Amino acid sequence: MDVEKPLWGALIQGGLSRPSWPFALLLLTVLAVLSLQITTNAVFPTWAGGGGLRQEKTLSSASGGDSQPTTCAGFFREGPERKVVMSVADFGGVGDGTTSNTAAFRRAVEHAVRLGKERGGGARLNVPRGRWVTGSFNLTSNFTLFLEEGAVILGENGTIDGQGKMWWEMWWNRTLKHTRGHLLELMNSNNILISNLTFRNSPFWTIHPVYCRGITSLISWVSCSFPSLLAYPSLDFLLEVYDQLSIYGAAAEFYVLPPRLGREVLAPLNAPNTDGIDPESTSGDLQFNFYTDSSTNVCIEDCYIESGDDLVAVKSGWDQYGIGMARPSSNIIIRRVSGTTPTCSGVGIGSEMSGGVSNVIVENVHIRDSAAGIRVKTDKGRGGYVANITISNITMERVKIPIRFSRGANDHPDEGWDPKAVPRVKGIFISNVVSRDSVRAPLLEGIEGAPYEGICMRNVTVLGLGASAKWSCEFVSGFSDGVSPVPCPQLQSNRSASSCSFS
């Protein structure tokens, strides 16, 4: 920062003109300490203004000209060629739709770890055509799981099917003794590619990266429907401390979608908590019925999602535990995603955001027949921050509340939460939004004592409302231009206009 320049200038001119070894050692030690980012509190990020993520070079974006959409496909770093290639059938697997292949998958992965290290370059495990029933199994670093055309892991006419109905019924009947598993969970992992896959019927969250860096999801589908289900345990990939992992399938197999889409996450619309993509404490640019949790550099694009919960949710820890971990979700792109959720939101941030959420781009998203379109959820006790969120080119049809900021869920992990820990929300840029056949005008509720600042809206149109419909705003401030119906007075401040850059 500029205020530091005189200090360093004095050190260079005075202290370092004739350096002594003790002083040099002390200086290096100070520099090393300053370079560490060790904290037990979520630190509010440096203010970047609208579109700040685009100015950074942490994400690799490529454009193939006017006929090719912008994509972050190049974000994934190709690793070395897999020198070990095996089939799950080599380890006793049988793809007949009845035989349990859990032991075969576990043996295959264990064998891949050993041979991949011995020969270098990692290993690839092929899953041939057939229906492969299995319980949970772990994957590994420097590893590719490849589903050949016609290969299905657990289920009908899809790719990876969690067969979640039995779990949903236990949840509905309140007979669950343990929490439901995620369909695909990534933990402490780096450089992950998910491509050309369909995910169906997750018992709980569908795709959940937590404490990860570098997630690219391309041409995969997440879906939830009610096919004929088998009473086998749900599939739960758990990837822990992995690097250079690829999960993908042959591209020709899957359902017909509009040409712009290539990934699908499906679940019955009444299936509980089947969020498509939940990146938590994550950074990147991809999210469809996907919970991104305390992760960074995440790319989510070209996805179709049907879900009983949020299509894409960005999270980063829960109350005092998230504050203590201080693992934010940042550098996330959510692009060309469409879908429906009758009870929740198309794209949600929070409410568990105690580690902080920043530098998120949401663009070219279509949401239909949903309870909410774009939603930011926080609460007292959360702490943390939400900052530098850019949302643009959003279309909605029959969405009840197109834009909603909500508070007061009163949802806490235990009695140890701190009611004085309030979140900071600053810099949410929303532009070029059209919502048709809406039920209510936008609802923006900040928190008393911690108002949401820098809420910037431009070219936002909500159609289908009654003549008496009005925006509802409390504890928020910002600026608006070209918004219909006329927004609340809190968004008409000229003083906020200078901070609302949509570049």
Image (spheres, rainbow, N blue to C red):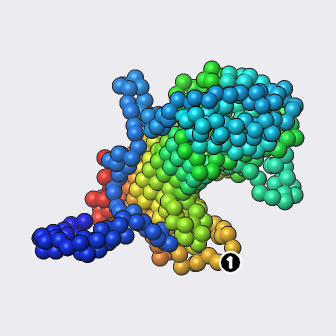
48 or 439, which is in the foreground? 48
Residue drawn at (54%, 34%), measured in percent from left and top?
A: 121
* Residue 404 vertical position relative to residue 135 in the rendered view, above or below: below
237 or 495, which is in the foreground? 237
Name which quarter of the figure residue 498 lies in. bottom left
* Residue 240 vertical position relative to residue 416 in the rendered view, above or below: above
Residue 164 in view: no
- Left or right: 499 with respect to 423? left
Total residue callouts:
1
Residue drawn at (81%, 39%), measured in percent from left and top?
A: 103
Residue 83 placed where, x, y %?
A: 58, 29
* Residue 190 vertical position relative to residue 420 in the rendered view, above or below: above
The amino acid at mark 1 is Glu
* Residue 425 vertical position relative to residue 210 in the rendered view, above or below: below
Residue 80 placed where, x, y %?
A: 50, 33
- Left or right: 33 with respect to 230? left
Residue 436 placed where, x, y %?
A: 54, 41
| Residue for badge 1 | 415
Assess disc 1: are there few (<14), some (14-19) or many (≥20) residues with their C-alpha within 10 Å of its C-alpha: few
Residue 53 placed where, x, y %?
A: 38, 49
- Left or right: 178 with respect to 53? right
424 or 269, which is in the foreground? 424
Residue 228 in view: yes
Helix, strand, or loop for circle 1? loop
Residue drawn at (46%, 42%), measured in percent from left and top?
A: 363
Picture quarter with the N terminus = bottom left
Residue drawn at (41%, 33%), measured in percent from left and top?
A: 70
Name which quarter of the figure residue 101 lies in. top right
